[in-house]
Image (spheres, rainbow, N blue to C red):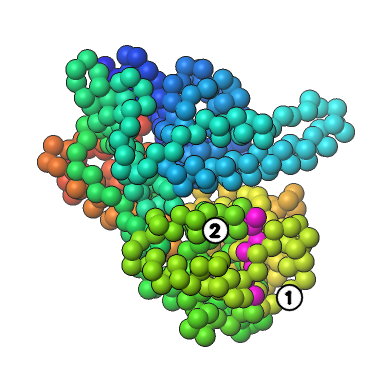
């Protein structure tokens, strides 16, 4: 009988990783990086609790680093099998994993300068660009909706998840001793109020269901209210002659923001003079979005595609894409009238922290938080009302006005999770909640029991169940 082991994203949001063993083969669903401070870094540095050489294949739900970020480490430690993903994910992980390797190298170089002076042992990065290149050669793209055999006893099919471009729900069909078992892994389910992307596909049958629970304890604000708050924050900043800082995930959230800023500008209501996209990865990701515009939702793709046929500046003429470090540094000379979208989304690194160092202590700065902030991250501290935060080793006073908007989330909320799972037929699958902090998981567990009389297990890392 096949088994399922919960490796990562068990009672935490990041580090998605699940191990399936049959009598003949072993596969991974995702191999994600832990995010959110020093503790997460320590988790990433630990050896895998399995032998990478024994993994026959990896099936990747989508490109976000908390789902894909340890794949090069897996290769470095001996994995030689294929990595199955959708075509858009195939393109995105090239971009995102190379960026991850470069950032890791820079962090290690910075740390080693101090360690060398102190006579301490020097550090090595988790992986380097050579490891990434090796991993990228092992990718195999599979179209959404196609069922393919990946080992002698396992077939998979990707279904639309609606989270970011290329994101997928994974259906796993296991043939074990003349018996077929179907496992469904939700990956990250999209918020059905998102523009551009299609809604998650409905699935009606499974024996086992792994369901994300990031927002298991709450419902998002409705989109019209969120947009009203977003535009009001922009207007307040413009009237006060201030800059707006928006830490944003390079893939998904950034493109959605550009869409809404373009709508506002086209209506003649955007008061800012410049919108800076200050993230080389977000710039490249936006190009990939444009390349895969066939995946956009039908109601949005027609007019939008016509508008950005030559590029995003056609949609938003005041957009400035700053790839170089020098261009990024020059933004800090602008004292007001600018919207600065910069990575990373949880404010734990990237160019946003340099803008924080220069502007977070200014009382006329506005910061708009538009995505989930994991515990231990600088973004979470700002959301929770911290008066000071550590930025690039400096203690910075938080004088800026912090706006937290929930309706832009790319994740399904509690109501949407319940509705999506409710489509499974009367014989409900065995349900396990993953990819969430414990309190939201407990709330979602209770909601499943109250609404459906359906027990939802909350596994811990290392738990093994038969499937």
Residue 275 lies within the magenta run: yes
Where residue 124 appears, as percent x and y from the top left, is 72, 29
Instruction: Name the spot of residue 231 as percent of width and height, x first.
Output: 49, 77
Asked whether 394 or 112 is in front, the reply is 112
Instruction: Tell me, yes or no, if residue 200 can be seen here.
Output: yes
**Which residue: 43% across, 48% down?**
166
In the shown orientation, is residue 275 left or right of residue 151?
A: right
Q: Circle 1 is placed at which residue position?
A: 335
Write the residue at 61% across / 79% down.
272
Rounded to the nearest angstrom, the CA distance separating label 2 from label 1 is 27 Å
Look at the numbered disc 2 and give the secondary structure of its residue: helix
Residue 79's x, y, as percent? 53, 22
Q: Earlier in the sequence, mark 2 or mark 1?
A: 2
Q: Which residues are magenta?
A: 274-280
Q: Relative to residue 394, is residue 28 drawn left or right?
A: left
The mark lying in front, picked from 2 and 1, is 2
Packing grade of label 1 (10 A; few <14, some 14-19, many >=20) is: few
Name the element at disc 1. loop
Circle number at residue 286 = 2
Tell me which secondary structure the magenta stretch mostly adopts: strand
């Amino acid at each position: 009988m096949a088994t399922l082991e919960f490796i990562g994203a068990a009672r935490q949001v990041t580090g998605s990783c699940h191990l399936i063993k049959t009598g003949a083969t072993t596969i991974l669903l995702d191999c994600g990086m832990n995010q959110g401070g020093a503790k997460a870094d320590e988790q990433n540095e630990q050896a895998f609790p399995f032998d990478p050489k024994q993994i026959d294949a990896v099936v990747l739900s989508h490109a976000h680093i908390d789902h894909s970020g340890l794949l090069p480490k897996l290769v470095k430690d001996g994995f030689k099998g294929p990595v199955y993903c959708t075509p858009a994910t195939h393109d995105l992980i090239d971009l995102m994993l190379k960026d991850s390797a470069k950032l890791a190298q820079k962090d290690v170089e910075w740390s080693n300068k101090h360690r060398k002076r102190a006579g301490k042992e020097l550090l090595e990065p988790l992986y380097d660009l050579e490891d990434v290149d090796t991993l990228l050669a092992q990718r195999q793209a599979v179209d959404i909706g196609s069922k393919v055999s990946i080992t002698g006893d396992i077939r998979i099919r990707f279904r639309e998840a609606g989270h970011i471009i290329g994101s997928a729900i994974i259906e796993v069909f296991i043939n074990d001793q003349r018996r077929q078992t179907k496992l469904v892994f939700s990956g990250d389910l999209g918020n059905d109020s998102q523009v551009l992307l299609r809604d998650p596909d409905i699935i009606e049958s499974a024996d086992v269901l792994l369901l994300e629970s990031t927002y298991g304890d709450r419902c998002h604000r409705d989109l019209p209210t969120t947009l009203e708050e977003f535009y009001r924050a922009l207007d307040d900043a413009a009237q006060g002659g201030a800059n707006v800082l928006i830490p944003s995930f390079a893939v998904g959230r950034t493109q959605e923001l550009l869409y809404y800023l373009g709508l506002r500008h086209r209506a003649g209501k955007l008061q800012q003079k410049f919108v800076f996209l200050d993230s080389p990865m977000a710039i490249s990701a936006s190009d990939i979005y444009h390349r895969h515009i066939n995946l956009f939702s039908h109601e949005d793709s027609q007019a939008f595609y016509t508008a950005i046929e030559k590029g995003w500046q056609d949609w938003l003429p005041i957009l400035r894409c700053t790839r170089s470090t020098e261009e990024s540094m020059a933004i800090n000379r602008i004292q007001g009238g600018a919207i600065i979208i910069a990575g990373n989304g949880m404010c734990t690194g990237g160019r946003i922290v340099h803008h924080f160092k220069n502007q977070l202590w200014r009382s006329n700065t506005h910061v708009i938080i538009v995505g989930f902030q994991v515990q231990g991250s600088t973004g979470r501290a700002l959301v929770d009302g911290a008066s000071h935060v550590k930025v690039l080793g400096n203690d910075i006073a938080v004088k800026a006005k912090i706006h937290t908007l929930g309706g832009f989330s790319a994740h399904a909320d509690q109501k949407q999770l319940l509705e999506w799972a409710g489509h499974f037929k009367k014989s409900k699958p065995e349900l396990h909640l993953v990819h969430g902090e414990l309190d939201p998981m407990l709330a979602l567990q209770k909601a499943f029991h109250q609404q459906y009389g359906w027990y939802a297990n909350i596994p811990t890392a290392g738990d093994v169940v038969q499937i």
